[in-house]
């Protein structure tokens, strides 16, 4: 029987009026909204920038009951109520056998694409206020992750500090910034220091590349399949930039969570990081103290959230059992809801009980400060 299960990667589905009612007044005419176009609801921002349909971020359970219905198109009235109603969200967790969840946005993921820095920051502030209220319904079970814009690092620090005061449990930043502002740059140093001082884990979540374009959006290409299949490339670059530039040596308590990118890519990157550091010192210019290697910082400071990577679980010794956290991805179309415990049990078959306990919930509890003694799951 599985131990207590916590999801390190679940989502809300933001209500359609969230930004229209909460965003700062100067931005209200450009606020994000859901707009019905040709019978389907689209996420729209500014005057007419259509970012995405809502079908793939609101369709949990369909993969089991009616996979043929899964499409990028959808309507808000078909969204699971638990996505935006915290009381129903708790009921859905009980149905799924999940005792606690770390909460990310759904629509909000796409707003890292915006070119307007002040608008993006205003969107994030309004969302963080709403999410904090959502999680206060049951703060022992719901741990919210703030959205932070680092276009202006000092503004990002201010919002990080405000998020901590709101009771949010961590903060997400773009999985990959603009090429000339990657995370090995010294401008971010005050932000890393602030996150460490506040004990706020940082997250790189899929679909948040800064001003990233969706490859294959044209009529004659397959929409995003190649990008999806190779999506670990960008967070791996960001992680390496932070490790090779000494971020975790200077801030040993800082935790970085790489979320919804699965696991199997990690052993190869760990191996090549250490090889590069050892054999290509002209490229790995920053030299660590006390004989530390890049993989040592990974195992101390980085955690990976996975959903269904059975191969990654077989490689757990090469990655580090303490570095693995499971997540359900509720309420998205690829979510394991409402069969999470069944799927997780199958993936963890043959894994020793103490390791199962860490992977299924213990590591998530440690990183996000869940009190395991407070949590129970309905039978």
Image: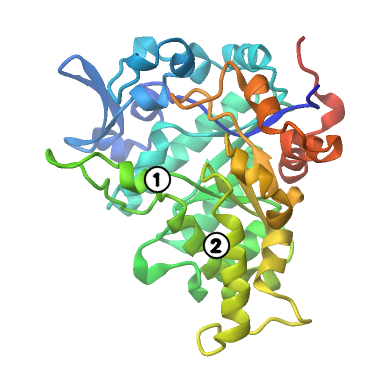
Residue in the foreground of this view, choosing between 290 and 255? 290
Which residue sits at x=70%, y=57%?
Answer: 318
Which numbered circle lies on residue 239? 2
Q: Which residue is mark 1?
A: 229
Image coordinates of residue 85 in percent, x first then y, are: 53, 15
Which residue sits at x=36%, y=40%?
Answer: 110
Distance from label 2 to label 1 (Cα)?
Answer: 19 Å
In the picture provided, is 109 more to the left or to the right than 39? right
Cβ atoms at labels 2 and 1 below 8 Å apart: no
Local secondary structure at mark 2:
helix
Note whether residue 126 is visible. Answer: yes
Q: Quadrant of the C terminus?
A: top right
Report which quarter residue 88 is drawn in.
Answer: top right
Mark 2, other Cα within 10 Å: few <14 / some 14–19 / many ≥20: many
- Outermost residue toward the bottom in this view: 282
Which residue sits at x=74%, y=82%?
Answer: 289
Which residue sits at x=78%, y=43%?
Answer: 366
Above/below status of 269 relative to 26:
below
Image coordinates of residue 32 in percent, x first then y, are: 31, 33
Above/below status of 90 relative to 152:
above
Which of the marked residues, 2 or 1, is nearer the chain's N terminus? Answer: 1
In the picture provided, is 92 more to the left or to the right than 99? left
In the picture provided, is 241 more to the left or to the right than 355? left
Image coordinates of residue 171 in percent, x first then y, are: 57, 47
Mark 1, other Cα within 10 Å: few <14 / some 14–19 / many ≥20: few
Local secondary structure at mark 1:
helix
């Amino acid at each position: 029987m599985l131990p207590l299960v916590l999801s390190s990667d679940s989502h809300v589905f933001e209500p359609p009026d969230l930004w229209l009612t909460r965003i700062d007044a100067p931005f209200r005419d450009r606020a994000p909204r859901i707009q019905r176009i040709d019978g389907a609801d689209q996420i729209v921002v500014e005057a007419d920038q259509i970012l995405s349909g809502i079908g793939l971020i609101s369709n949990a359970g369909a993969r089991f009951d009616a996979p043929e219905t899964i499409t990028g198109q959808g309507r808000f009235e078909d969204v699971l109520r638990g996505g935006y109603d915290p009381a129903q969200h708790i009921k859905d967790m009980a149905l799924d056998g999940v005792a606690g969840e770390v909460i990310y946005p759904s629509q909000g993921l796409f707003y890292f694409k915006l070119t307007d820095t002040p608008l993006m920051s205003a969107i994030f502030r309004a969302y963080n206020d709403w999410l904090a209220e959502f999680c206060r319904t049951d703060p022992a079970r719901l741990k919210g992750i703030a959205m932070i814009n680092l276009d202006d690092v000092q503004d990002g620090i201010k919002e990080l500090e405000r998020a901590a005061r709101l009771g949010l449990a961590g903060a997400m930043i773009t999985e990959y910034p603009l090429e000339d502002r990657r995370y090995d740059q010294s401008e971010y140093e005050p932000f890393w220091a602030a996150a460490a001082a506040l004990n706020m884990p940082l997250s790189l979540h899929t679909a948040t590349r800064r001003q990233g374009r969706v490859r294959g959006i044209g009529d004659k290409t397959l929409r995003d399949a190649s990008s999806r299949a190779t999506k670990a490339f960008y967070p791996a670059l960001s992680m390496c930039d932070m490790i090779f530039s000494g971020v975790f040596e200077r801030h040993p308590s800082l935790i970085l969570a790489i979320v919804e990118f699965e696991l199997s890519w990690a052993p190869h990157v760990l191996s090549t990081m250490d090889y590069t550091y050892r054999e290509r010192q002209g490229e790995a210019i920053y030299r660590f103290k006390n004989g530390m290697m890049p993989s040592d910082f990974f195992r101390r400071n980085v955690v990976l959230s996975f959903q269904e990577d059975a191969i990654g679980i077989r490689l757990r010794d090469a990655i580090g059992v303490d570095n693995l956290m499971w997540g359900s991805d509720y309420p998205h179309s690829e979510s394991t809801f409402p069969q999470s415990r069944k799927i997780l049990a199958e993936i963890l078959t043959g894994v020793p009980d103490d390791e199962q306990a860490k992977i299924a919930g213990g590591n998530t509890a440690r990183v996000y400060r869940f009190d395991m003694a407070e949590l129970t799951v309905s039978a």
